[in-house]
Amino acid sequence: MRKTRKEYTDANRVAWDEAAAKHAAHNNAALFAAARDPDFVCLQGEILNTLQQVGVDAKQIIQLGCNNARETLSLRNLGAARCVGVDASAEFLAHGHELIRIAGAEAQVELVEADIYELPQKFAAEFDLVLVTIGVISWLPDLKAFFEVVRSLLKPGGQLVMQEMHPVLFMYEEDPDGGVSVPRYSYFSGEVWEETSGLDYYANETYESAPNYSFMHRLDEILMAAIASDLQLSRFVELDYDISNFCSDLEHSPVKPPLGFVMVMNAQ
């Protein structure tokens, strides 16, 4: 039986809080050391190229689903005047606060614990740019409401910049022994996946986790939900390289599906 939007997002928050320590064990020592460099930028490839094209310098930017804030800090280091990172996970944000402290970026970077669907009203029409990166929208049960939130955050003429894994990848299943990923699911299934095997996508360690829920959103659903929220598509690029660490072998497949996309939407 389908759950309410709040039930899904609350469950996912619990599961991500559980995963934070496992991610930190793999990443934080090197990340905190790298953050001491004022030129630290973890964004790369097409998303970095797109941000440079639309311009970051002196802008006010909010990142939805910021995780440990490494990308939010990167925006500050690219020249943004004010950066706000939002995430539902208090545990990941705790790592983000330490990262920002180490970088000496407290004056430019604010981290906010909140459900994306329930952002503080003070953020309405505050931002020149909304950033959404890999692994956000697949955890969100309601695309229409999400893009309405995005639109509400933007000043007139503001822009959404999004990098995501391509929804075609949700057709595939990884080989547990590191072999070839193969298509197992219909692109048109509208699947809601319930998982309890953990969220460690670095070492791929499985563990008994709180249930978490991800959603199969087709590309047309993503685009049309954004357009219905008075956002106008100005740039769309499909990517032929791995950005998600999911089915990574497909990057080298002779029969390669799209692996990601970057898009820019302008506020009307």
Image (cartoon, rainbow, N blue to C red):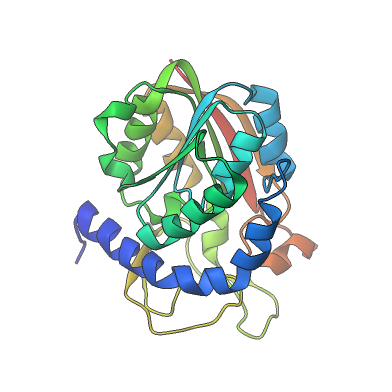
Image quadrant holding the N terminus, namely: bottom left
In the drawing, does residue 98 fall left or right of residue 49? left
Along the viewing direction, whichever of 161 and 182 lies nearer the viewer:
161
Q: Is residue 86 visible?
A: yes
Q: Quadrant of residue 39?
A: top right
Image quadrant holding the C terminus, namely: top left
Picture layout, residue 164 above or below residue 61: below
> Residue 24 at x, y = what percent?
54, 69
Along the viewing direction, whichever of 137 and 168 lies nearer the viewer:
137
Please tell me which residue is depicted at 47% across the width and 72% down the height of the picture. Answer: 21
> Residue 66 at x, y = what percent?
48, 48
> Residue 216 at x, y = what percent?
42, 56
Picture layout, residue 152 above or below residue 107: above
Please tell me which residue is depicted at 36% across the width and 69% down the height of the picture. Answer: 15
Q: Is residue 165 visible?
A: no
Please tell me which residue is depicted at 68% across the width and 59% down the height of the picture. Answer: 33
> Residue 249 at x, y = what percent?
72, 68
Picture layout, residue 79 above or below residue 166: above
Q: Quadrant of residue 193?
A: bottom left
In the drawing, does residue 82 fall left or right of residue 242? left
Please tell me which residue is depicted at 72% across the width and 34% down the height of the picture. Answer: 49
Picture layout, residue 109 above or below residue 7: above
